[in-house]
Image: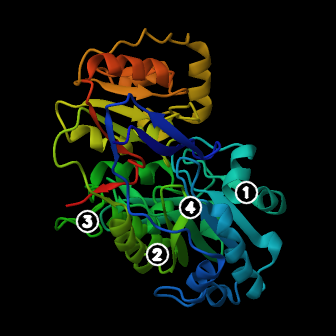
Amino acid sequence: MNNTATIHTRAWAGDEALTLTFPEGWTVETFGPQECPQVTADQIQTAFDNPIGTPRISELARGKNSAAIIVDDLSRPTPAAELIPYVLKELETASIPKNQIRFVVGGGSHRPIDAEEIDKKVGADIARAYQVTNHYFMGGDLRALGSLDSGLPIYIDRVVADADLKLCVGGIYPHANVGFGGGAKLILPGVSGFATMFYFHTFYANRGHANIERQGDEPDHRDAAEAVAKVLGLDAVVNVTLNRKRQITGVFVGDFIQAQRTGARFALKTYATRTPETEPDLVIANAYPLDYDPVQTAKALWPLRLFKNAYKVAINPATDGICHHGLYDEIDYARFCKQQSQQPQQELPEPKIEGPHQTLMWSENFPVDEFYKRNPDGILFRDWDTLRNQLIEKLPDNARVAVFPNAAIQISEK
């Protein structure tokens, strides 16, 4: 009988292993994604040597004078620094001048990441040797590229729009709007302007969580993103999948539709998770590897909705500690920070478990006001021992615990 579970936590802030220990007599079972080995350097190179649906990047770059490489921000767990050297090798082969290669953090309407975070995303050496900028979706440094037939206006970050070669380096993770991330998502919403993003989020349907292809007859979010990427002229993508430890398990280089679809099919298989056949007494959903940005928490909560009568715990250190999404908050980051500085900090209410209807969260950094705004029936705990001890009081001596170690990227088996 096993009464422990080892999970990983704190993406971008240590990526630590953490063992949760429960009382003797409790049965703890871990329901994880498929076990997948980390790819080798040779396997990464093979993916670059054999792109999906396009010539290799060095051939696409031949004769071009500038390049923009778009990466995601730290709200996504993509270890871009491990991939960028392979991209730069391709550009060097094509003789694109080093000073004409720019990196853009395609965070959409997320906050800009700072210098330390840029080092983590692209690597400190790359950050010192190349110009790396944050996309600012409310700024005026955008290029107008017309509109789609649907009326969606296209405004794209000028650095990206003006580059001769346009590449995206991102990850493939389940996402309600577009099915899976990757592909054109780093263009829209990644480096799009406010008007483009507003139209995109308002007038298009979701593809649905972990759906690879469109579910209806009308164009959806992914269709719109791919249509904009075609207008822009996105040349290629480098997309990856990850395992339980945030290690790369698959690399998909090439056409932004074909490579993304190939990667999404691999993700659908490797992120697949069996679920308990009978209702446990306690369900634990760990937000890793999307546990840096507290805004991403909702992606990890699906296991808590599987069982009505089980006690429900989410683990999310929310290391960033900043709940800001410019599009939904309708405010730029500078004004958001000013507002926050003028508001008194809400104190944490004494956490007390009432029953299984509550969402219980263990988080050292999730802002108190934002937590209770998003989870009015929830309870926020700052330390594990307090939460664990209260659960012991509520649950039977032979309690059964189901742990989902990477809930934010796991997919329930159909």
Circle 2 or circle 3, nearest the eye: 2
- Which-is-in-front pick, marks 4 and 1? 4
Q: Secondary structure at mark 3?
A: loop
Counting from the top left corner in percent of width and height, residue 344 is at: 56, 10
Check disc 4: other Cα within 10 Å, few if <14, some if 14-19, many if 20+.
some
Q: Is residue 74 left or right of residue 300?
A: right
The residue type indicated by label 2 comes to: Phe
Q: Which residue shows up at 59% across the image and 28% down it?
A: 335
Residue at position x 40%, y 70% from top?
226
- Tell me the amino acid under the disc marked 1: Val
Tag on residue 247?
A: 4
* Disc 3 to disc 4, C-alpha distance: 34 Å
Earlier residue among tags 1 and 3: 1
Q: Is residue 105 above or below residue 261?
A: above
Rounded to the nearest angstrom, the CA distance separating label 1 from label 2 is: 22 Å
Residue type marked 4: Gln
Q: Position of residue 111 (x, y in %)?
A: 58, 41
Separation (CA) of disc 4 from disc 1: 24 Å
Residue 184: x and y in percent read 45, 67
Q: Name the amino acid, label 3.
A: Pro
Query: Dot 2: what SS?
Result: loop
- Front residue of 389 and 412: 389
- Residue 219's label in the rendered image is 3
Label for residue 132?
A: 1
Vertical position of residue 93 compared to residue 411: above or below: below
Which of the numbered marks, if any, corresponds to residue 256? 2
Residue 65 visible in image: no
Q: Nearer the viewer, mark 3 or mark 4?
A: 4
Q: Categorize mark 2 by other alpha carbons within 10 Å: few (<14), some (14-19), many (20+).
A: many
* Res 214 → quadrant: bottom left
